[in-house]
Image (spheres, rainbow, N blue to C red):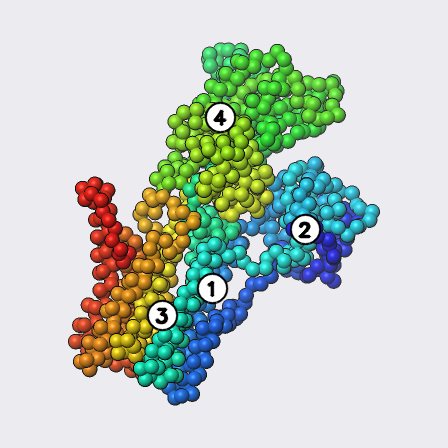
Amino acid sequence: MGRWTASSAPGDGIGVTGIDESVASPWLETPDQVATRLATDLEHGLGESDATRRLQRHGRNELLAAERPTPARLLARQFVNTMVLILAVAGVVTYLVGDRTDSVVIAVIVVLNAVAGFVQEYRAERAMDELTELTSDAAVVVRAGTARDVPATELVPGDVVRLVAGDVVPADVRLVHTAGLRVAEAALTGESEPVDKSVHALVADAGFVGDRENMAYKGTAIVDGRGEAVVVATGMATELGSIAAMLTSGRITTPLQRRLASLGHRLAIVAIGLCVVVFTAGVARGEPASTMLVTAVSLAVAAIPEGLPAVVTVALALGARRMARQRALIRRLPAVETLGAVTVICTDKTGTLTQNRMAVERVWTASAIHGIEGDGYSPSGRVTVDGGADRPPDPDLATAGRIAAACNDAAIHETDDGWVAVGDPTEGALLTMAHRVGSTGVVPARVAEIPFDPGRRRMATVHDGPDGTFWIAVKGALDALVPLLAGDAPVDEVVAAGDALAADGYRVLALAERTIAGVPADLADVERDLRLVALVGISDPLRPGVAGAVATCGAAGVATVMITGDHPRTAGAIGRRLGLVTSDAAVMTGQEVDELDDDALTERVEDVRVFARSSPAQKLRIVDAWRRRGAVVAMTGDGVNDAPALQRADIGIAMGRSGTGVSREAADMVLADDNFVTIVSAVHEGRRIFDNLRRFVRYLLTTNSSEVWVMLAGPFLGLPLPLTAAQILWINLVTDGLPAVALGLEPAEPDTMRRPPRSPRTSILSGGLWQQSVVVGLLMAGIVLPLELFAEARDWPWRTMGFTTLALLQLGNALSVRSETRSLRAVGLRSNPVLVLAVIASMVAQLATVYVPFLQEAFDTEPLTALHLAVVIPLSTVTFFAVEGDKVRRRRARERAATGSGGQVAERPSFQ
Ligand code: ATP
């Protein structure tokens, strides 16, 4: 997006004009002035009732999509369809030439069709809305003096919000406190460099959003630091809101929707061509032109799968809803379809594969190894020491506790569910350890800090020390601290101790300290000449079920790759437990990744299942390398820096609980429970949805082609009008309606996760699907037309018999397309009761057209006798048995090929 210049102040936006709680140019005023104008309190925030009142007045803090069709418009859209319009014209013509019943029936069916289309689209819209709601973020707001999480959509002008690195700014805000706050405003200004923010009032306004350094705007990302701010505009009144119309015009279409839409167009052209043939042939054989016109157009309406893209949307949106119930929230619809094709899942370790319930279990000091025991984050526990309790107390253990408590931003407190850690779980564990070794009472005041950063892998804090000195507490990865230790440190001994802890699967953190006389001008200089006090071994148990999920992926041809910031030995130990690697040699470090150029990395990447000590930049290279190999990559991430890799991956997956807002914004899917197992269920669901779409398309093509064949071949066999226009439309309505929708509910086949992923390049029609559909359609016509000829010769109600047979053949087909390989017996009727009900309902409706007097008139039918039925019913099952038989034949052929007994089996062309 190019540079964007503000044309109006936020306060002037929609919904705020003329209301008291607005500030025209908050950047020109001091925070207190802004607060007064907004009638809010910077310390305590708004009161609850005030916030509710303001929410009613200003509306929800959301960007309304530019075009959100109303139900009425949605319904109207169903009729504004070229073919339906042509049909309407044809209907009027029929009416005028006198065939009143036919035109009324056509009108009714067209309306029913439109209603069915409307219901589908409405469901899709609703499901999409639900998804948007599910994936919206929370903001930390101070209300009535307490800070708490509130859905970002409920923010109102006057709210006091807290912002930290990783957040997406939830509304337009005037900053009131900042600490190293830097904001990436590319979303609004196109400026890629983050901007430093401050709280001072500007003296003049150049009118450019990017220059207002005391403001933070909705949709921009906090990359560093913290801040507190007061909301000045929400929803469409924000700067982003004023350009939202540009951003949200039209929903994203998925590749599958686009492919099917183009398939629909091609089929439409073929169908129209064929209808011209039907019309000409009919007229040539002496049928009235008006009848043939309505018939041909009805056939076109029936044969053109104009609803195909809508059906795909419904299938994807409903699939996304099911995934949401399984805790995988889809942010972008195409993800649902890509999930089924995923070949590689690159996952973080901490929190995704492990529980992120950290506990310090070991503390190594130069003189002893201590064991720390206790329950979760509870401060009470027991300290053991090798060599027995008689040893003199270890002063380093007490210092380790002090460092752990001082260089720490987490808190632990007791809730109804026991003790919990607020903040980083690693720090929660360290604080718990500090309590257990009895060192928390003596934490001196913090005067400065260098926050934790995954790239540096360490954190340092500066505290007041005795006699005007300063005490430095540092914690971080051992390899990140070793270069900072004082010259006389016993590095070899320490590294060996760290390796030993890591080999046991512990996450290892080193704790170090130093005392200095004064704080240097460059704060980074405090991290020198450190004394290493202790190493802690933190356990983080695997989540239940992850090892099984990794194995499931293996069977499904999906590679699992762990990418972690942790030490190679810790990563290797966990990789072994998960069955990803068998030795540490298979672990590649971030440094080794950097040593390879892109080609070499692409070459090697397939053999590596565990990447350790990796940075977000390396994650990005790993994704690229896999993608160059043609893989479809799902990648998890939680930090601000993970956003590029999440965007680059085919499926970016963010963490709902521990992840940052920025990573969630960049992701296609959010895991509500941060759990790897959820990704695997989503892949499973993605595959099921794709299979169901294939079933649906197969069913639709078969139905449509059978009608076309019947109408096309009829005149040449001496049956100018094998089916009437109303009958064609009826079959289309009944079969496309209920059974087709019920096919979308088909449960996954048992081998869904035992077969390799489909290639994203193969079309939904691959594997001979369309040829098979056309052949099955031909077979149906090959049953119906001879039947009609046979019946006509006997003076039976031949057209009614043909009509009924064709309709029932479709229903049999609905049952057999349920599986491409398994017979209906194996699939069972109970696994999709809705489909069975739909088939029964359609059957009853079909019989009604034959036996209910007024419908007889409408559909031009005559009642069938037992004799007629005795012919119709067996014939109606022919394609069902043919397709089922073909499945058996193909399965046997495969089994013979597998056992080798049958030698080479040449696959004959088949129905399936
Ligand atoms: P993953 O990348 O799988 O989530 P991770 O949590 O180990 O794994 P990072 O959070 O990037 O990855 O941490 C990298 C390293 O930084 C850790 O192995 C640890 O040594 C160190 N570290 C983690 N958290 C802190 C912290 N709060 N303070 C200091 N050092 C930390």
- Rendered image: mark on residue 121: 1
Judging by the rendered image, the residue that carries numbered circle 2 is 2
Position of residue 303 measured from the top left corner of the image (x, y, whole percent): 38, 69
- Rendered image: mark on residue 113: none
Q: Quadrant of residue 491?
A: top right
**Mark 1 vs 2: CB contact within 8 A:** no
Q: Amino acid at mark 1?
A: Glu
Position of residue 559 measured from the top left corner of the image (x, y, whole percent): 41, 38
Q: Amino acid at mark 3?
A: Asn
> How far is disc 1 from disc 3 in space, using C-alphas?
18 Å
Judge whether 422 appears above or below 324 on screen.
above
Secondary structure, mark 1, is helix
Of the numbered discs 4 and 3, the one sitting upstream in the chain is: 4
Secondary structure, mark 2, is loop
Answer yes or no: disc 1 within 8 Å of ligand 1.
Answer: no
Kindly identify the residue that appears in the image at 22 percent across and 44 percent down: 904
Asked if residue 217 can be seen in this view, the reply is no
Judging by the rendered image, the residue that carries numbered circle 4 is 568
Which callout, 2 or 4, points to the residue nearer the camera? 2
Kindly identify the residue that appears in the image at 39 percent across and 35 percent down: 547
Judging by the rendered image, the residue that carries numbered circle 3 is 732
Secondary structure, mark 4, is helix
> How far is disc 3 from disc 2 in space, using C-alphas?
49 Å
Which callout, 3 or 2, points to the residue nearer the camera? 2
**Mark 1 vs 4: CB contact within 8 A:** no
The local crowd at label 1, few if under 14, some if 14 to 19, many if 20 or more residues have their Cα within 10 Å, is many
